Amino acid sequence: MHSLKPITLDLKPAVDRLFEIENSRSADFCFGNVYMWDKRFKQSVTLCGDRLVTLLHRKGELFFAFPVGSGDIRPSFEFMQGICDRNALPLRICGVCEEHLALISEAYPDEFEIIEDRDFSDYIYEIDKLAEYPGRHLHAKRNYCNRFEAEHEWSFEPITADRLPDCLDMLDKWTRQSQDRLTDDIGFEHDAIVRGFESFDKLGLEGGMLIADGRLVGFTVGEVISSDTFCTHFEKAYTDIGGAYTMLCREMARMVMAKHPDVRYVNREDDMGNPALRTSKLSYKPEEILIKYIVRSR
């Protein structure tokens, strides 16, 4: 009998191996994201053969992630269905990508309803475009950067262990400044960032800090998640510093290109259905919106 267990750091090697088999550009399939967001999604995992089963909770409802790995998907689906049957719930699987739909329909023809999950779909960008903001469509982004560079003495530096306290201090200040628009999502994000910083090196995270006139005004954190994709997990900047977010995005792209020459894309994750966040992410002109689906037993 398989037993579900909480997400802990000691599981990282086993989980990473299965995510590497998947080699997906989806932000869902990297250990850092799973670990950091555990407080929000209350996840537990187990192995079924050579596939990872992840139980999670979205808005109080029980879901599973698609069981990544290799081999027959049916043992993992039977395990998930058994849990749902014991709780008198339908089997619901979230974060399902296009390539998974074919596997499901082959194993279980006409047994599942497929629902597009646009709010949790990822924005994928070409890294060289984020590094330069070329062309007419990104002209405004270049202008923001030019203005920032003209107005400030600035630098972009890697996040190192000795600077993590500075980033945490800035996060707390940013959160206090955002009290008027504080939501559950922002609260959970704060917890996720803290959890990531607490195990920054063990999680294999990378990040950069934007310094303006001797002051830390922004930071960004992510990791390589596939053979050609870097995922930006978090980006925080003071909103009263014009162009800070645009600079963070550009400079992190340049840093990643220098360190990981095989990376061609940046996944800047989903918009959670937030209209302002959706407008912002679209303004950077994504190469692709990686559509995800919810698959639900009929």
Image (cartoon, helix red, strand yellow):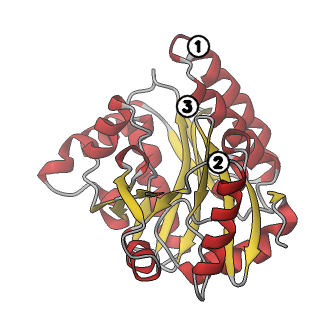
Q: Position of residue 206 (x, y in %)?
A: 64, 59
Left/right placement of residue 130 relative to residue 22 reads left
Which quarter of the rendering shows the C terminus?
bottom left
**Numbered label attached to residue 202:** none
- Disc 2/disc 3 C-alpha distance (Å): 59 Å
**Numbered label attached to residue 88:** 2
Q: Amino acid at mark 3?
A: Asp
- First in sequence: mark 2 vs mark 3: 2
Q: Position of residue 277 (x, y in %)?
A: 38, 35
Q: Amino acid at mark 1?
A: Gln
Residue 31 visible: no
- First in sequence: mark 1 vs mark 2: 2
Q: Amino acid at mark 2?
A: Ala
Q: Position of residue 66 (x, y in %)?
A: 55, 66
Residue found at x 59% / y 84% = 21
For label 1, the residue is 179
Left/right placement of residue 125 relative to residue 213 reads left
Neighbours of disc 1 within 10 Å: few (<14), some (14-19), many (20+): few
Q: Position of residue 267 (x, y in %)?
A: 44, 59
Q: Nearer the viewer, residue 91 or 185?
A: 91
Query: Which secondary structure lies at badge 1?
Result: helix
Which quarter of the rendering shows the N terminus?
bottom right
